[in-house]
Amino acid sequence: MLFYIAAGIVILILTTFFAFSARYKRCPSDRILVVYGKVEGGRSAKCLHGGGTFVWPIVQDYQYLDLTPLPIDIRLEGALSKQNIRVNTPSTFTVGISTEPGVMENAAERLLGLGLVEIKDLAKDIIFGQMRVVLATMDIEEINADRDKLIANISGGVEVELRKVGLRLINVNIQDITDASGYIDALGQEAASKAINEAKVKVAQAQRDGEIGAAEARKDQAIRVAAAQAEATKGENLAAIEVANSNADRRTKEAEANRLATAAEKVAAAKALEESYVAEAEAEKQRASREKASQEANIIVPAEIDKQRIIVEAEAEAEKVRRTQLGEADAVRYMKQAEADGIKSVRFAEAEGLKMKLLAEAEGTEALLVKKAKGFDSIVAACRSTEGAQNLLLVEQLPVIVSEQVKAISNLKIDKITVWDSGKGGDGNGKGSTANFLSGLVGALPPLHELAGNVGVKLPGYLGEPAAPAPAETPKPAAKKS
């Protein structure tokens, strides 16, 4: 039992040891170990370059940042200098992740998880922007002549921006500097012409010194020869003559040598002046070209920029007007659509209301007819015969029939009736003229049976029988003439 317990303890210790050893991470020299998660000091990550550290499970994790240098080709073209001359500066930059404390944390925060290609693209964008800024602060002569200052300015500007993302600038190599206007070429031609002129002047001076030395050597030689001859023939008359001749010859040669030397000197000086004038004329031409380029850069380029700015502003204003009009058109369309939807809803509601009203009226009419039918059934049952029920209903309608009869004379406009009656007239029945007038007026009312017949009702017999029509008068035959 003790053996098993001891074996279990040993296995537990070995397992713990291997587990802890697996979580101890060592950092190689070409990488940065970034431990993130629960890090002491409230930092976002802990960065190590070299050495090692223990990475706690669950609460911590780790990744590596590659320190491999990244060469970046920058083909900067058309960058404006301080004189508004566009310059092309192809160059090569070498950058890498910085191992400086504090800058490593920037790299851990902004570059962790990115590949070398993505880091290279980020650095390329930063370098492009800073190169344009630096070139805009320097004259074209300074950019072309002082490469060390140009590289120092670019390095200083780029380094500051790269440190913000955890990178450092390793090397800068400016390959060439050119411009589209030919200003730099003109400066080079001017310097070359000046150097050539100076070299030609030095060559002429050397030739002059050589000719003078040769003349002096010949002169010395002639003097020594004459002295030797004079010494050899000394004491003799012939020697005196020869000495005199030698002297004459010496003078002649000296004059000739002096003439040749002077002529050579003047020819050399004239050639030097001629070449100098030619060089100055060429330099003036180059200077005129440079002035022309400068004037174009100072006048035409700003005018072109203003032209482009005006065009862009006009296009922006047109786009603004177009968008405003589109917005107003959309608003009108939406309002019309909403109004049409509202009218449609109102009409639908009116139709539904009318439908409900008609249904209600139909149901009311149906209920009234049902009630009437039930009432008729009750009347028939109470009268115990159909004929009795009809008579009862006719009695109910008598007021309506009488009202219709009265309407026949109700609209007569009778203000006043004046009857002149002597009391003598009559019809043989004891009635006077006045009585006959009133009887005729009452008789003008429509008979009750005729009114009932007009509405399709036949009155019962106890209301009287309709009057028989008066017999038509037979026309009397005309009397014959004899």
Image: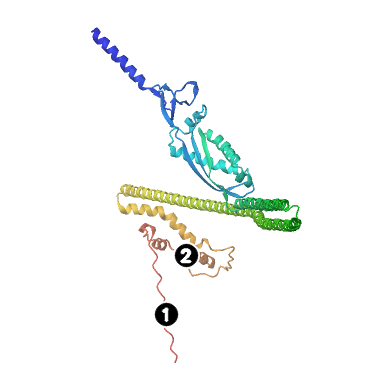
Amino acid on which the number 2 mark rests in the picture? Gly
Q: Nearer the viewer, residue 458 or 424?
A: 458
The residues bearing labels 2 and 1 have C-alpha atoms spaced at a distance of 26 Å
Residue 176 pos. (x, y %)? 54, 47
Specify the label residue 443 is tagged with. Answer: 2
Residue 118 pos. (x, y %)? 45, 39
- How is the rendered protein coloured? rainbow
**Residue designated by label 1:** 475
Question: Is residue 476 rendered to the left or right of residue 143?
Answer: left
Quadrant in which the C terminus is drawn: bottom left
Amino acid on which the number 1 mark rests in the picture? Pro
Furthest residue in direction bottom, as rendered? 482
Specify the label residue 11 is tagged with. Answer: none
Residue 322 pos. (x, y %)? 55, 54
What residue sits 57% from the left and 44% below the top? 132
Furthest residue in direction front, as rendered? 236
What residue sits 61% from the left and 45% below the top? 145
